[in-house]
Image: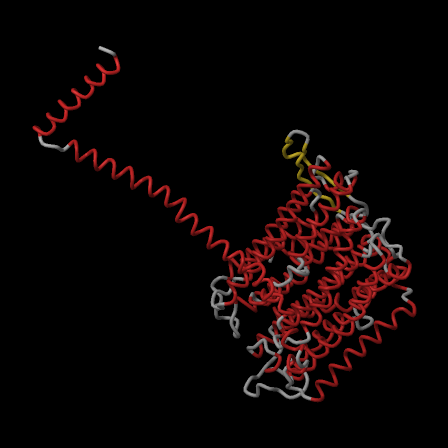
């Protein structure tokens, strides 16, 4: 906890002091003409993201003291594995901060991989849950698939530029084919870490981990790393329209897939998990249309309201003992603090003005709409149209499932009359209240020049908006998202009024089971990847055991048999041995006579 507090203080100090990019690096090793460096780069955007990471990490660690370490009377130790949990949280945070400040691709890769290891350990923290180890293994393997591409992309860029320093890689004039291939390989890693289609399937299952871990993974560390990495390397993607087109398609599919899957979930944590998948789709969509500033602003806003929502959900789970919304209801009066915090978080998620999500999400939609209508983005115009239309539909669907969560969990009649819920203790309550402040007010920072000046640090020629100005003058274009938001919320209200206890999947008819299963992409991956790989592994294992091991063991058995035969001959009786020696001498002599011509 002290480490997170110190990191937050340092990040805030850097945010106040760094008004222009500062970079330092040292050469680690030179291999021929390839120079491998270790260095850091600080700018306004990096400082803002570092503040968000450290603030969420500190809130999670304070919250975890009550959620994991102490019992209801704050005097009973209930989790004997709290020390390794706290150490892993700290290492996880440090790895993300390393990604944020990395000045070269090798350091970025180190932080990237350490986060993958920590996510495996933290998701599997509660060994009493049978699904936790399986979910941790799934997260590790799925993200490793993407990381293979990420590693190859880094290697390709480093070899092409002759250096792994990010500034050198960005400044180098890469061949078009090399640059496109490298960007596509990097997107594989982004799809894995940021849970984007088709490598998104690990994130909902990762809800088997403790709720504070879910808050950290979803809000400020792992899933945000891919978006941040693309924003840092955006000048490369800007010169590779094919990669941006792939990113745009991936973003649109992920945005809608996550939103529709969230509508059919009964587990409150899985609703929030699928919403993260969808919201990351907004960020990658902004990158695809050439608006990295909009993507980073939504990343910061999402970090605040998603951490708030997960910690508020943890307070509800802690109070009622279940994650199923069908067993909740009527919590508004019993848990007023948690209720209003959830209202703020869900309002920001849905984009209700003037909460933070309204400004950041509409910034993404404004950038996509400008690119679609003007055709001036770095990617093809159809990519901008795809992202824009998917984003607009996502507004309505997000309002639908956000309103449904609030209604089913907090309003109506209690469905567990024997449970006496209450607001969480102070160590859990204060992080929730403090996170509600940026979730509500962060969007207003877009009107402050010091904030926008720092956020605009990574902007390039492809940036389609003067971000602060455009947010302050959204104009009539904002009415369409607001109308879609109202329509989605009204649809959820009508369904809830009709049947407060209705199963969300059943209410969607024939599509309900499909949405609840995440469009059955787990089944597709199992059929197309898991089963063939498992079958191949069995064949390879059988070949190894029967051919390789058989040859090795067979040669051993043959040598032992030959040795046994020779040993038997050596143990012959004296008359037979003498006869054998005499016979051998006669044979050797006869051979000498015949061959020597004597």
Give the total of numbered labels. Answer: 0
Colour setting: secondary structure
Q: Where 237 falls versus 413 (above or below)?
A: above
Is 283 in front, or is 69? 283
Q: Quadrant of residue 226?
A: bottom right
In the rendered structure, the answer to whether residue 455 lies left or right of residue 585 reads right
In the rendered structure, the answer to whether residue 215 lies left or right of residue 248 reads left
Is 561 in front, or is 440? 561
Q: Dividing the image into 4 quarters, which one contains the N terminus?
A: bottom right
Q: Where 427 falls versus 230 (above or below)?
A: below
Q: Dividing the image into 4 quarters, which one contains the C terminus?
A: top left
In the rendered structure, the answer to whether residue 510 lies left or right of residue 138 reads right
Which residue lies most toward the top here?
598
Q: Position of residue 80 (x, y in %)?
A: 47, 63
Q: Position of residue 220 (x, y in %)?
A: 68, 59
Is 249 in front, or is 407? 249
Q: Position of residue 379 (x, y in %)?
A: 82, 54
Tell me which residue sits at (41%, 44%) in the image.
548
Which residue lies most toward the left here?
575
Q: Quadrant of residue 276?
A: bottom right
Q: Position of residue 362 (x, y in %)?
A: 83, 66
Q: Where 54 falls versus 347 (above or below)?
A: above
Tell me which residue sits at (29%, 41%) in the image.
557
Is 37 in front, or is 286? 286
Q: Quadrant of residue 499?
A: bottom right
């Amino acid at each position: 906890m002290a480490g997170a507090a110190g990191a937050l203080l340092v990040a805030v100090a850097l945010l106040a002091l760094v008004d222009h990019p500062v970079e330092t690096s040292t050469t680690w090793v030179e291999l021929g003409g390839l120079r491998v460096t270790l260095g850091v780069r600080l700018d306004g955007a990096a400082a803002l993201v570092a503040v968000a990471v450290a603030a969420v990490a500190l809130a999670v660690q304070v919250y975890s003291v009550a959620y994991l370490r102490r019992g209801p009377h704050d005097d009973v130790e209930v989790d004997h594995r709290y020390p390794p949990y706290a150490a892993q949280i700290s290492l996880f945070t440090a790895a993300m901060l390393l990604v944020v400040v990395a000045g070269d691709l090798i350091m970025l890769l180190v932080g990237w991989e350490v986060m993958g290891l920590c996510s495996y350990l933290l998701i599997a923290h509660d060994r009493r849950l049978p699904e936790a180890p399986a979910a941790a293994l799934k997260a590790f393997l799925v993200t490793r698939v993407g990381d293979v591409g990420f590693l190859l992309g880094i290697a390709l860029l480093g070899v092409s530029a002759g250096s792994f320093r990010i500034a050198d890689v960005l400044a180098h004039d890469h061949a078009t084919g090399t640059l496109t291939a490298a960007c596509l390989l990097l997107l594989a890693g982004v799809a894995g870490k940021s849970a984007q289609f088709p490598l998104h399937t690990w994130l909902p299952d990762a809800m088997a981990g403790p709720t504070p871990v879910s808050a950290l993974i979803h809000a400020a560390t792992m899933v945000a790393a891919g978006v941040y990495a693309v924003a840092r390397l955006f000048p490369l993607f800007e010169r590779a329209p094919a990669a941006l087109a792939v990113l745009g398609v991936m973003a649109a599919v992920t945005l809608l897939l996550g939103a529709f899957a969230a509508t059919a979930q009964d587990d409150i944590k899985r609703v929030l998990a699928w919403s993260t998948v969808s919201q990351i789709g907004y960020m990658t969509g902004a990158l695809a249309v050439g608006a990295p500033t909009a993507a980073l602003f939504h990343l910061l806003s999402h970090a605040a309201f998603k951490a708030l929502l997960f910690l508020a959900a943890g307070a509800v789970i802690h109070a009622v003992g279940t994650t199923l919304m069908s067993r909740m209801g009527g919590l508004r009066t019993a848990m007023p603090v948690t209720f209003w915090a959830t209202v703020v978080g869900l309002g920001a998620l849905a984009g209700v003005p003037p909460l933070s999500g309204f400004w950041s999400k509409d910034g993404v939609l404004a950038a996509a709409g400008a690119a679609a209508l003007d055709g001036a983005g770095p990617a093809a115009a159809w990519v901008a149209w795809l992202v824009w239309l998917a984003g607009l539909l996502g507004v309505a669907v997000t309002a639908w499932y956000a309103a449904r969560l609030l209604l089913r969990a907090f309003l109506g009649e209690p469905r567990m009359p024997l449970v006496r819920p209450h607001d969480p203790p102070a160590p859990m309550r204060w992080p929730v209240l403090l996170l509600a402040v940026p979730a509500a007010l962060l969007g207003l920072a877009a009107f402050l020049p010091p904030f926008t000046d720092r956020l605009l640090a990574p902007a390039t020629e492809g940036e389609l908006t003067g971000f602060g100005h455009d947010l302050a003058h959204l104009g009539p274009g904002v009415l369409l998202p607001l109308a879609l938001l109202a329509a989605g919320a009204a649809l959820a209200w009508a369904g809830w009024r009709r049947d407060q206890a209705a199963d969300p999947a059943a209410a969607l008819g024939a599509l309900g089971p499909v949405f609840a299963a995440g469009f059955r992409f787990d089944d597709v991956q199992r059929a197309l990847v898991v089963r063939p790989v498992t079958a191949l592994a069995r064949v390879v294992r059988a070949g190894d055991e029967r051919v390789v091991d058989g040859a090795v063991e067979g040669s051993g058995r043959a040598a032992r048999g030959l040795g046994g035969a020779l040993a038997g001959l050596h143990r012959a009786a004296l008359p037979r041995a003498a006869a054998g020696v005499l016979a051998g001498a006669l044979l050797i002599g006869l051979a000498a006579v015949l061959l020597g011509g004597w």
